[in-house]
Amino acid sequence: MDKRYNEMSGEGDLNLDTAEKRRTLWIVLWLNVAIAVGFFITGIAGDSNALLANGLDNSSDAAVYALSLLALSRSRTWKRGAARFSGIMLLIFAGGVIADAIRRFVEGSEPTGIMMMAMAAVAAVVNLICLKLLNEMNEKDVNLRAATTFSFNDYISNGGIIVAAIIVTVSG
């Protein structure tokens, strides 16, 4: 098998149980917990489904980082199972977000655009920090590659919230 296949499949020889990598994952984990709490507080206060959805997403990301920490010294099979669990968790959260969006459509809601923009801007900065920390890691296994992808997706979704917030603010 070639090296690229080994890297993609998680079959390569990786040494991911270093103190530096654990430290990085702990930092990224707690940053995501903090962002999730911020999203939940501002989502409830600002009546924003987008903020609540990102709170759920960052909660699942924090769980992914916790699983990645557990997976560092585990077998490749365990690592793949942890990555699969992360994906399933995101699908479940997506179902909850869709249900809440339907509820808000039926019952109505008035999100606060300025609060949405402010929280999304803060989260974008934190997600960039997470991306920088994760990208500095060498020899990433499947869980760490997934974690990097999740942080990048979060950064992009922050831009979507800012666009939505502008629309909410302009349309009243």
Image (cartoon, grey):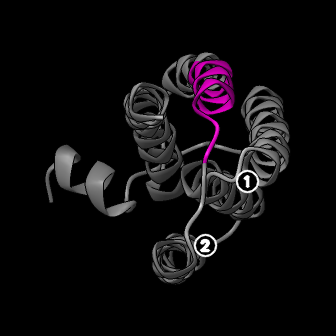
The picture quadrant where one finds residue 22 is top right
The span shown in magenta is 111-124
Q: Position of residue 103 (x, y in %)?
A: 55, 81
**Place of residue 164 in the rendered image (x, y in percent of width and height, measured from the top left):** 41, 37
* Residue 100 occupies quadrant: bottom right
Helix, strand, or loop for circle 2? loop
The residue depicted at 48 percent of the width and 47 percent of the height is: 150
Q: Residue furthest front?
A: 172
- Percent of width and height locating residue 108: 55, 69
- Amino acid type, callout 2: Ser
Are circles 2 and 1 on residues that touch, CB within 8 Å?
no
Question: Eyeballing the image, is 53 above or below 30?
Answer: below
Reply above or below: 69 against 25.
below
- Is residue 105 visible in the rendered image? The answer is yes
How many C-alpha atoms fall within 10 Å of the one at disc 2: few (<14), some, or many (≥20)?
Answer: few
**In percent of the image, x 64 and y 27: which residue is there?**
123
Query: Above or below — where is 29 with respect to 113?
Result: below
Amino acid at dot 1: Ala
* Circle 1 residue: 62
The residue lying toward the viewer, choosing from 152 and 45, is 45
In primary-sequence order, the first of circles 2 and 1 is: 1
Is there any visible trace of residue 91 in the rendered image?
no
Q: What's the distance in space between the residues labelled 2 and 1, CA to CA?
A: 21 Å
Residue at mark 2: 75
**Magenta highlight on residue 35:** no
